[in-house]
């Protein structure tokens, strides 16, 4: 399979800021387009993630993630791709691009989600983040998998998001310059 080294693939737990960092990157560089695997799934199924979980079940959602991964690996270049928190388990992650794990403590993530101005909406759309204890157990069970899957690890608590974006672009050798 083709290795799309030009794509950046963000993995990491729900609420860590994959979409936010992807948006920062697309502001900074002219060559990257932003995609989100949950958004792709919702648009091609015309169904909200929450409803897919409730009606078809988690296994069906994971199959949709794999289908999305296959399509991305074959067809997408020059994109920064934010993924759902369980997407790192697809069988061709590295064929999509450079895998970047966005890492943070569970408490930091929990606070980030629950204190957001749209916290209710952020929680509502995440069926696996309904109970603190369950979400924390899921977080702990995934740490090793995220680390193992990563080409690059980024500590999200280390700096403001604009700075993290700038550093990441320098690290992967992408030009900056666009000011939207
Ligand atoms: C999931 C994370 C969600 C979404 C789905 C399952 C997970 O995406 O894909 O609810 O298994 O961690 P975010 O990480 O964008 O919240």
Image (cartoon, rainbow, N blue to C red):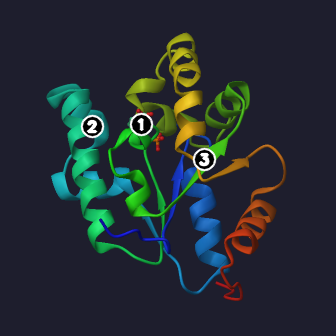
Helix, strand, or loop for circle 3? strand
Helix, strand, or loop for circle 2? helix
Can you identify the residue that label 3 sits on?
Answer: 101
Q: Is residue 107 above or below residue 170?
A: above
Q: Which is more toward the observer, 173 or 155?
A: 173
Answer whether labels 1 and 2 touch (C-beta < 8 Å). yes
Residue 122 appears in view: yes
Looking at the rendered image, the quarter that the C terminus falls into is: bottom right
Query: Can you give x and y, in whole percent of width and height, for residue 95 in the image?
Result: 38, 60
Q: Is mark 1 within 8 Å of ligand 1?
A: yes
Query: Can you give x and y, in whole percent of width and height, for residue 48 in the image?
Result: 27, 43
Residue 17 appears in view: no
**Label 3 to label 1: alpha-carbon separation:** 12 Å
Looking at the rendered image, the quarter that the N terminus falls into is: bottom left
Can you identify the residue that label 2 sits on?
Answer: 62
Can you identify the residue that label 1 sits on?
Answer: 86
Which residue occupies 66% across, 33% down? 109
Helix, strand, or loop for circle 1? loop
Q: Earlier in the sequence, mark 3 or mark 1?
A: 1
Q: Is residue 113 above or below residue 140?
A: below
């Amino acid at each position: 399979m083709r290795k799309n080294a030009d794509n950046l693939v963000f993995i990491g737990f729900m609420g860590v800021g994959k979409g936010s960092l992807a948006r920062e990157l697309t502001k900074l560089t002219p060559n990257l387009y932003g995609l989100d695997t949950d958004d792709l799934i919702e648009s091609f199924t015309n169904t909200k993630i929450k409803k897919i979980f409730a009606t078809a079940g988690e296994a069906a959602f994971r199959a949709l993630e794999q289908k999305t991964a296959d399509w991305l690996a074959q067809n997408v270049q020059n994109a920064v791709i934010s993924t759902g928190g369980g997407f790192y388990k697809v069988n061709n992650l590295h064929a999509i691009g450079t895998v970047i794990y966005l890492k943070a403590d569970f408490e930091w993530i929990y606070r980030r989600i629950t204190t957001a101005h749209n916290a209710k909406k952020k929680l509502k759309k995440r069926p696996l983040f309904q109970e603190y204890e369950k979400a924390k157990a899921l977080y702990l069970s995934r740490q090793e998998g995220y680390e193992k899957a990563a080409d690059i690890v980024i500590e999200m608590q280390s700096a403001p998001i604009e700075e993290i974006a700038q550093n990441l672009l320098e690290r992967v050798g992408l030009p900056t310059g666009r000011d939207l």
